[in-house]
Image: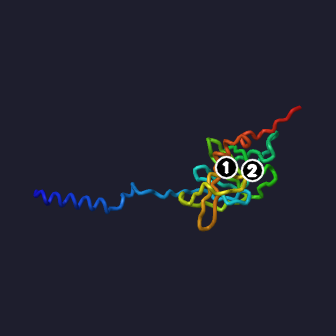
Amino acid sequence: MNPNAFECLQGMAQLVRAKAAPAPAMQQKIQDWHGAAVSILGVRCVISADETRKIVDVPETIPLPGVKPWVRGIANIGGRVVSISDLSAFLSGGSRTSNGRQALIINGRGIHTGLLIDECFGGVRLSTEELRTNKKVAKELQAFVRGVFSTEDGEYALFDTNRLLTDANFTQAGVITTS
């Protein structure tokens, strides 16, 4: 092969590499995020699909003695005994209760828990590029929100159920009484 032809081919290869678009695997991906859109204390929130097991009508609960007032009791959800808590009452210190008719069953940290929510709007797909971590949210929600998705149709606070399930005020729902 003629050295000039080889050099010409090398030059063409360099030009092609320089002008070529990156391979799809190398392009920065816009991550799709999906979850359940709900209303908590009147704020539109989203909860990750990875943390959400199902949304059910508020089940009949069996009250538990010696628990804080926001714990509604236990219920049979799909053959599992699940604790049911009023999320609005917990977050607001009891000043508000959920008037909703649905419970969000979450599966976080190996625990199945039912959270009464004000309203469920259904599933939503969002782009992680729309997530802002510097947005303000209602003070009752601040400890449990990782950021706010800003979309064309409004904002959704990203509610982190793992933060809720590790919060001592939530996990220690028993009322200590002294006799």
Q: Is residue 161 above or below residue 101?
A: above
In the rendered structure, which amino acid carries the disc numbered 1? Phe
* Colouring mode (rainbow / by chain / secondary structure / one colour): rainbow
Question: Mark 2 to mark 1: distance in Å?
Answer: 10 Å
Q: Nearer the viewer, residue 131 or 36?
A: 131
User: Marks 1 and 2: in contact by CB < 8 Å?
Assistant: yes
Residue drawn at 56 percent across, 57 percent down: 34
Which residue is at a point 80% across and 55% down the rendered structure image?
A: 96
Foreground residue among 101 and 163:
163
Quick check: can you spot residue 79? no
The tally of labels here is: 2
Determine whether the residue tagged by mark 1 lies in a helix, strand or loop: helix
Which of disc 1 and disc 2 is earlier in sequence? 2
Q: Quadrant of residue 74?
A: top right
Which of the pair 144/179 is nearer the observer? 144
Kindly identify which residue carries mark 1: 144
Residue 92 x, y percent position in the rendering: 77, 52
